[in-house]
Image (tube, rainbow, N blue to C red):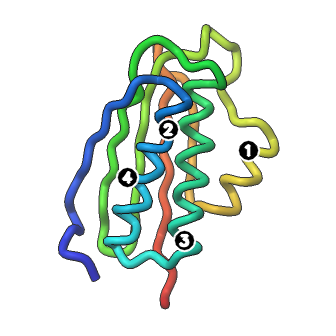
Amino acid sequence: MSDMAGEEVRLSIPARPQLLRVARLTAAGLAGRLGFSFDEIEDVKIAVDELCFAVVGSKGRPGTVELRYVLGTAWLEIEGRGPDQDGAADVAPSELSRQILDAVVDEHELERRGDQVHFRLLKRRGEN
């Protein structure tokens, strides 16, 4: 449906919760270009917000959040990484956050790798 399939967009933003809107808007714009429905676009925005917030927290962190948006013919994959959460033992999303992510995207993960927290989500476009 889109001439953007196979493209990749990268975004780097300061690890501040006030700037997560930029990540959401980028995801929404790309999902719209891929022909996602309004509800699917909202789902992507919710998922990006949940996972980015897990990285930056309510007060932000030093450093940046790096996002990579990969566009398929009927899917959008978003990978991100950012500064470690102060060495917290577990970076898994809360139970509520996990339920939200399970409801809005097809796949998601959040894990620590070295001194960074990484996440990934995949949203497939439904048949309209």
Question: Dot 1: within a 10 Å radius of its alpha carbon, few (fewer than 14), some, or many (20 or more) residues?
Answer: some
> Residue type at mark 1?
Ser
Q: Which residue is mark 4?
A: 26
- Residue located 44% across and 75% down the image: 36
Q: Nearer the viewer, residue 50 or 22?
A: 22
Query: Vertical placement of 81 versus 6: above or below?
Result: above
Tag 4–tag 1 contact (CB < 8 Å):
no
Query: Where residue 113 sits: x, y (%)?
Result: 48, 21
Question: Dot 4: within a 10 Å radius of its alpha carbon, few (fewer than 14), some, or many (20 or more) residues?
Answer: some
Q: Which residue is mark 1?
A: 97
Q: Nearer the viewer, mark 4 or mark 1?
A: 4
Q: Which mark is residue 40?
A: 3
Q: Which residue is mark 2?
A: 20
Q: Nearer the viewer, residue 10 or 98?
A: 10
> Residue type at mark 4?
Thr
Q: Is residue 107 left or right of residue 96?
A: left
